[in-house]
Image (tube, rainbow, N blue to C red):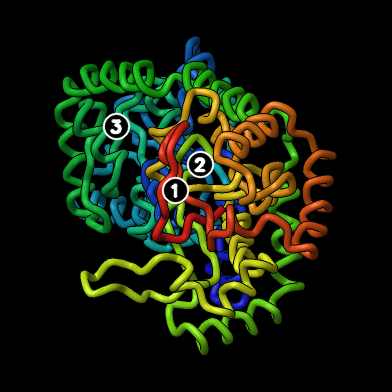
């Protein structure tokens, strides 16, 4: 495994990763560090599940033929590594430990490396060059032979290159194979696997890049083999209680079914939203730049108006629009009414709906869709009736059924009824129709304001209206 250093390739990989994360309905991480890394990229925690690799007990249920690699005597203490001989696995550390054991005269402790990989020839050359006869190399084996090998070993070696970024973000199959077979584990790096071993008693954790401490742990177990049965039982219990593959598979299937059920009417809608938003942002980039310059010139900074809005299932996100109003306040420090803060440029942006263009970034991220009920204010959530709240069963949209059927000229009740109708009747063809009619509405500039007011009044429940001094975004 080589290290990628080309900045262009790294940038493209970062973009693809970001797009993949934000276009997915749900994400599954194999380890806590992966989940945290995904969340740090702006993905809500509730969209992430931590489902690690698991234990396949069927493979190791009937290990009737225990065996040891050639060169390992029955009386030797055998520690095995099974897996790819690559950079990430840091197998040079095993040879460092072998050299330490040799220097202490502990040739009775054998280290077996089973598998293949890019670095295997280099590792074999080093072992031969340094006379490390306590290191045994073996070709990959099938599942039946693997079970017998596990049964014939004393401990499993969980090794990783000394790269801090890997510590919490790895979920190695070999660790789960070891505990599936009831094999105690020696782990040489900090992180969640280290914590598992310490909590369960299924093995020993040693510091990274410390051959002496690693050798000490092996010598202690070799000299006190009476510790191994308890560790073996703890390893089996850890696998059965927390990492049974069938149970984890059921959790994964449950997530898939829930995700499909939530999006069953339009399984390809997120894909089409993503592709359309990418294309629109590329085509409209010059217009976005010009508008940003105009807003900066006429209104100052910031260019974008951002506000927390409820999205799918009422989860909050930051919606982006071009600013259309100033921040002018009265003598008490309160914002002036909308009509007094709305500038000529702002009126133009609203009447043409150009202020909505930055929401394409919300669509790209997966916060919004091109078509859906408009995202309103977070404070409205407790005011909805049970039926009105159904508007949050889908992602909010840049445009929607209410927008082409009256927009701000409608009452709140009429608008919500149209939103719910869309939720109950949405189809791909309906979305295409709404997008087409939206273009016509924008050209005609229909329904921009409500009853002669600059913006839509505040929603206060099923009855009563009150002025809204912040951008209601409707």
Q: Residues within 10 Å of mark 2 (few under 14, many from 20)?
A: some
Q: Secondary structure at mark 2?
A: loop
Q: Are marks 1 and 3 in contact (CB under 8 Å)?
A: no
Coordinates of residue 101 in the picture (x, y in percent): 24, 49
Coordinates of residue 261 in the picture (x, y in percent): 63, 24
Q: CA distance from mark 2 to mark 1?
A: 62 Å
Coordinates of residue 382 in the picture (x, y in percent): 38, 33
Where is mark 1, residue-wise? 458
Q: Residues within 10 Å of mark 1 (few under 14, many from 20)?
A: some
Name which of mark 1 and mark 3 comes first in the sequence: 3
Q: Secondary structure at mark 1?
A: strand
Coordinates of residue 67 in the picture (x, y in percent): 46, 23
Vertical order, 444 against 327 (above or below): above
Residue at (20, 33) in percent of width and height: 198
Residue at (27, 43) in percent of width and height: 107
The answer to which of 416 and 155 lies nearer the viewer is 416
Vertical order, 461 against 435 (above or below): above
Where is mark 3, residue-wise? 77
Looking at the image, residue 106 sits to the left or right of residue 24; the answer is left
Where is mark 2, residue-wise? 83
Name which of mark 2 and mark 1 comes first in the sequence: 2
């Amino acid at each position: 495994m080589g290290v990628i250093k080309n900045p262009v390739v790294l940038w493209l990989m970062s973009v693809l990763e970001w797009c993949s994360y934000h276009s997915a309905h749900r994400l599954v991480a194999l380890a806590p560090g992966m989940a945290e890394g995904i969340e740090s990229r702006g993905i809500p925690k509730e969209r992430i599940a931590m489902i690690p690799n698991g234990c396949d007990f069927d493979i190791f249920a009937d290990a009737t033929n225990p065996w040891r690699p050639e060169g390992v005597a029955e009386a030797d203490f055998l520690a095995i590594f099974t897996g790819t001989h690559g950079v990430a696995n840091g197998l040079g550390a095993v040879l460092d430990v072998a050299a330490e054991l040799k220097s202490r005269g502990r040739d009775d402790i054998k280290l077996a490396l089973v598998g293949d990989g890019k670095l295997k020839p280099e590792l074999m050359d080093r072992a031969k060059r340094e006379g490390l006869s306590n290191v045994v190399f073996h070709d990959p084996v099938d599942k039946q032979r693997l079970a017998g090998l596990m049964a014939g070993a004393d401990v499993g070696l969980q090794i990783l290159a000394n790269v801090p970024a890997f510590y919490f973000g790895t979920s190695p199959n070999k660790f789960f194979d070891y505990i599936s077979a009831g094999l105690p584990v020696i782990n040489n790096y900090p992180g969640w696997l280290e914590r598992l071993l310490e909590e369960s008693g299924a093995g020993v954790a040693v510091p990274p890049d410390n051959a002496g401490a690693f050798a000490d742990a092996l010598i202690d177990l070799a000299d006190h083999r009476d510790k191994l049965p308890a560790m073996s039982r703890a390893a089996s219990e850890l696998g059965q209680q927390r990492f049974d593959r069938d149970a984890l598979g059921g959790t994964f299937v449950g997530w898939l079914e829930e995700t499909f059920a939530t999006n069953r009417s339009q399984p390809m809608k997120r894909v089409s939203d993503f592709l359309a938003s990418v294309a629109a942002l590329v085509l409209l980039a010059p217009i976005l730049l010009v508008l940003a310059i105009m807003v900066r010139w006429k209104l100052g900074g910031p260019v974008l108006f951002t506000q927390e809005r409820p999205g799918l299932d009422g989860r909050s996100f930051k919606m982006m629009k071009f600013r259309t109003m100033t921040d002018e306040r009265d003598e008490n420090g309160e914002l002036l009414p909308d009509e007094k803060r709305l500038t000529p440029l702002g009126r133009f942006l609203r009447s043409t709906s150009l202020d909505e263009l930055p929401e394409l970034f919300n669509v790209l991220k997966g916060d919004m869709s091109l078509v859906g009920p408009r995202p309103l204010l977070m404070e409205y959530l407790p005011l909805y009736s049970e039926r009105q709240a159904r508007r949050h069963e889908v992602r909010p949209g840049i445009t929607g059924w209410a927008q082409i059927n009256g927009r701000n000229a409608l009452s709140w009740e009429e608008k919500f009824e149209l939103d719910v109708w869309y939720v109950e009747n949405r189809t791909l063809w309906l979305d295409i129709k709404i997008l087409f009619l939206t273009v016509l509405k924008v050209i005609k500039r229909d329904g921009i304001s409500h009853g002669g007011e600059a913006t839509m009044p505040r929603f206060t429940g099923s009855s009563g209206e009150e002025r809204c001094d912040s951008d209601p975004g409707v």
